[in-house]
Image (cartoon, rainbow, N blue to C red):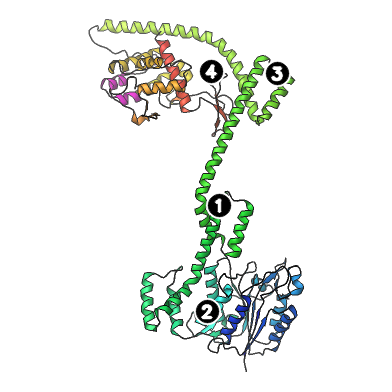
Amino acid sequence: MAKKIALLIGVSEYGEGIPSLSAALNDVEAMQRVLQNPKLGGFEQIEQLLNPDALAMRTAIEKLFKEAGKDDLVLFFFSGHGITNDEGHLYLTTRNTVKNYFKSTSVDANFIQQESKNCYAKRQVLILDACYSGAFAEGWRLKSIGLDLKQQLGAEGRVVLTSSSATQKSFEQEGSTLSLYTQYLVEGIETGAADKDNSGYIFIHELHDYAKAKVLEVKPNMTPSIIVDKEGFHIIIANAPKSSEAEYRKFVEQYAQKGEIASLAIQILKKKQEYLGLTNEKAKEIEDEVLEPFRRRVANLESYKEEFAKEVERQYPLDQNTYKMLKDYQQDVLGLRNEDVVPIELEITSVKETEYQKQVQIQKQREKEEYANNLRRYEQEFTQEVQKKYPLDEYARNRLKQFYQSLGLRNEHIKRVEEIVLDSIEEAEKLLQQQEAERLQKQRKQEVAKRRKREQKTTQISTNPTQETDDLSSDEDVDYKCLRDLLKAGNWKEADEETLAVMLKAAGKEEKGRLDIQSINNFPCIDLCTIDELWVKYSHGRFGFSVQNRIWESVGGNTNANYKTWCKFGDVVGWRKGFLVKEWITYDNYIFDVTANTGHLPSIGSLDVWEGFQIGLMGMWVEIKSLGSMGYWWNERMSGWGAWGEGTVGSAIAGYSSLMSRFVSCNM
């Protein structure tokens, strides 16, 4: 006659180097309770083996499989530590297993597999609630379980349930007497919740699916597995109890979502409770049991969040040792996966990361400024040596090398600085030779321009001495009628835009759209005077270059004007505004009517139309008129060091200063 026989082994005590387990013996007691219950498991013969040594454990396992008959249902259950060797092979520990010699003092998984294969019983269930128990699959013939499960009862086959994968630990629970996996195996049988198809029977695969789902809710990093040989998933492990409590539990399982029960579901469950005749207390107890796994997972997430926040507050960024401890706490204690904690870590570190990156940028900026200062110091030192004697002798070269090495300067930057200094000296010599020739040429051009203008004015007056006329003279055939008409009509903004257009045309820079120093120094005097006279005339002396020049000179403006001078000028003409802190206004905020400050228009001086000079390949910039006084700054775009003159402010000062100088020279 067919029998149901079981061997339940629990090991809580171990030898040196292996920690004890508090739940193992309780797991055995709980499994025996549900398996021995005639209304549930109905097992006739159950043997307990608590804290055995290796010999006693092997003997009991051999006896279980050897004495089982062909029609018997054999169940083997183990709760304790599992250890794998370097090849990933599993050993089940015993009372006398020690860490350093675990192979000789534990039970090899191969022994259990071999005894199982030699057993006559056609129905076998092996349950391993141990770390790395998934390694038991080694050498086991696996078969897919994605088949039709509604087969006749009592099918043949072997099935192995494992609490973890081949690389995972199983977990004991704080405040619980049972290990996590065994708790839900027992719960699935005792409450009937594992009977998913409501057949009245609990198949082994249903029991595993129920326990696995609950375990994953609590600790997602722990993955129970099922190992199937032949048709083992059809084995019936227990009867499903028929009771109001079991029926109500199934409804709660159906409606529970992510640890909560929706308000609509609560109303439905209330009716189910009344129909099944359950008290409020009993219904609440069942609901709490169903929701408990997810709530425990939430508690684990909160625990990780608390510990992670403490470590981040103590130290950020986290060092490697702290990060490893947090990962061990996450995976080995709380059973959480990386994807579970990533949102928590991002939430906590987002503010810290912003602050950290800000400090990093500040430090980088300080280092750049310090490097720039050191580069300036070397440039000054090199310039002094070159002025004393050139070419440099070996002694001077060695001294300079020691100096820039002490400053931490890179060779490629030293090379560029020296090239620029030497080029500047050479350029200065050429400049001195050219300046005299340019001065004479400039003087001749001014005399010719003045003479031509006087002749043109005389001709216009003689042609129609009674009619008021505008001088629209141009050396570059520029038509100033549009500018005159706009100014005459009081269309100040359009006139301002037209002024830039005609100046670009007169300077031959229409295509480029920018004015460089050379084009300003060579700007045709006739055209510059024509533009100014039109502005002065139609603004009744309020606007124009001549008006701006008087203001420019009054604030100390000259060819060597600095930013302070530029700010004073901007304050007077209304290009800078503010009460306590003044700022440069944008073009949209300019005042294009006669209520504006004297000299407010034309706005060519404040626009970004000035172009500087570039010398060399590293982005080193220098104003020719101020050789030897370069101000270096880091040029991010060119990954090199640059000098004042590239930026909008530096170019505007240099450009407008040259424009005013040109206006003065044209009217001498």
Camera-nearest residue between 79 and 315: 315
| Residue 298 in picture, x, y percent from top left | 50, 65
Is there any visible trace of residue 158 in the rendered image?
A: yes
User: In the image, 115: left or right of 534?
Assistant: right
* Front tag of 1 and 2: 1
The numbered mark, 4 or 3, whose residue comes first in the sequence reads 3
Instruction: Give the farthest residue toward the left.
Output: 466
The numbered mark, 3 or 2, whose residue comes first in the sequence reads 2
Badge 4 amino acid: Ser
Badge 3 amino acid: Leu
What residue does disc 4 label? Answer: 626
What residue does disc 2 label? Answer: 188
For the residues labelled 4 and 2, the Cα–Cα distance comes to 89 Å
Q: Secondary structure at mark 1?
A: helix
- Badge number at residue 392: 3
Q: What residue appears at the point 68 percent right and 26 percent down from the top-left corner?
A: 403
The numbered mark, 1 or 4, whose residue comes first in the sequence reads 1
Q: Quadrant of the N terminus?
A: bottom right
Is there any visible trace of residue 499 in the rendered image?
A: no
* Figure quadrant of residue 35: bottom right
- Badge number at residue 528: none
Around disc 4, counting alpha carbons within 10 Å, would you say few (fewer than 14), some (14 to 19), or many (20 or more)?
Answer: few
| Residue 58 in picture, x, y percent from top left | 73, 81
What residue span does the magenta drawing correspond to? Answer: 474-497
> Residue 516 in magenta?
no
